[in-house]
Image (spheres, rainbow, N blue to C red):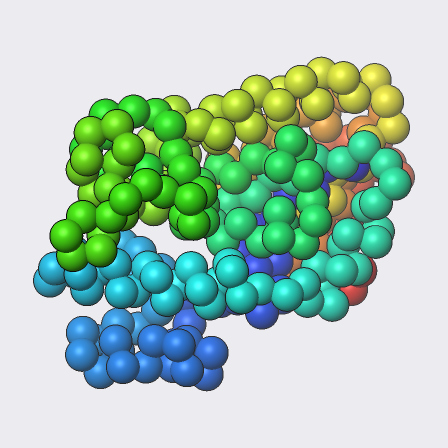
Amino acid sequence: MIVAASNGFDIADGYNQFSCDDAFLRVFGDLRERYGLASILQGLMARWPSDAARREFLDRLYRYGHRGYASSPVMRALDKLTAGRPRFVVTCNCNGRFERAGFSSEALLETEGSYARLRCSAGCTTETWPAESVGAPDAEGAPCCPRCGALLDVAVGAPHDIQRLEPIRSQAEHLQAFLAAHASTRTVVLELGVGQGNRDIKRPLMAWAERAPQAAYVVVNREEPVLPTLPAGRAAGVRGGGSL
């Protein structure tokens, strides 16, 4: 089974990077007052007035979105549904929650990286490090690159940028190996909350399913489902929140 998960699944899991909701205000309310911060996504993309201000936001985001995460009913249901069989998760969600929920890091592709990992802001290496295992900080307590001493930043970005980094590059290779190994076996692609025009997750998986003689494809989405061209009975769409 291949699970393709995007922002719609994140929202069902209790994490909304687009919204100034109660959870956002509880964690980042004072940053909203100081800087006008209106969402997690804005915070990740913003030009902060100082490195210290950005670091404060990222530290809180890591504690709230990753380290403090406990599996939601939706995540537990997905785990139960897919457990006991070969499975691979492809996600653009950047909070590292699938690993926290017990899904294997060897069967995971995070197409836009994860803020649970850090990379060199100077780009001296393609290596990344878990956020809690970096080397000595600088005089102000900021995490520094073990290779060159530059500040570390979150390993998050657009796929064309982030997929040159490790472990994302290796994750992409693992996905291709999984697809090749299951090209002729009964395999379900379960797509959860992925934008129906998505080019980085949806389109490649639909193209693979159209080539795989025993693949089935299921879309759960609030938008009108877009399905691959497959024989009758091998593709289905559920419009709405759906249930697992």
Residue in the foreground of this view, choosing between 111 and 101: 101
Give the x, y percent position of residue 115: 41, 49
The correct choice, above or below, for 118 with respect to 124 in the image is: below
Q: Is residue 238 visible?
A: no
Q: Is residue 205 left or right of residue 121?
A: right
Q: Is residue 145 visible?
A: yes
Give the x, y percent position of residue 178: 70, 23
Report the quarter where the N terminus lies. Answer: top right
Residue in the foreground of this view, choosing between 217 and 131: 131
Q: How many marks?
A: 0
Q: Is residue 223 left or right of residue 230?
A: left
The correct choice, above or below, for 165 with respect to 181 in the image is: below
Residue in the foreground of this view, choosing between 33 and 106: 106
Q: Is residue 190 left or right of residue 130?
A: right
Residue 26: image quadrant is: bottom left
Residue in the foreground of this view, choosing between 9 and 155: 155
Residue at position x 27%, y 44% in the image: 136
Residue 130: image quadrant is: top left
Residue at position x 37%, y 66% in the image: 60
The correct choice, above or below, for 231 with respect to 89 in the image is: above
Give the x, y percent position of residue 82: 81, 46
Residue at position x 22%, y 38% in the image: 121
Residue at position x 20%, y 29% in the image: 148
- Looking at this view, name the residue that lies furthest to the left: 49
Report the quarter where the C terminus lies. Answer: bottom right
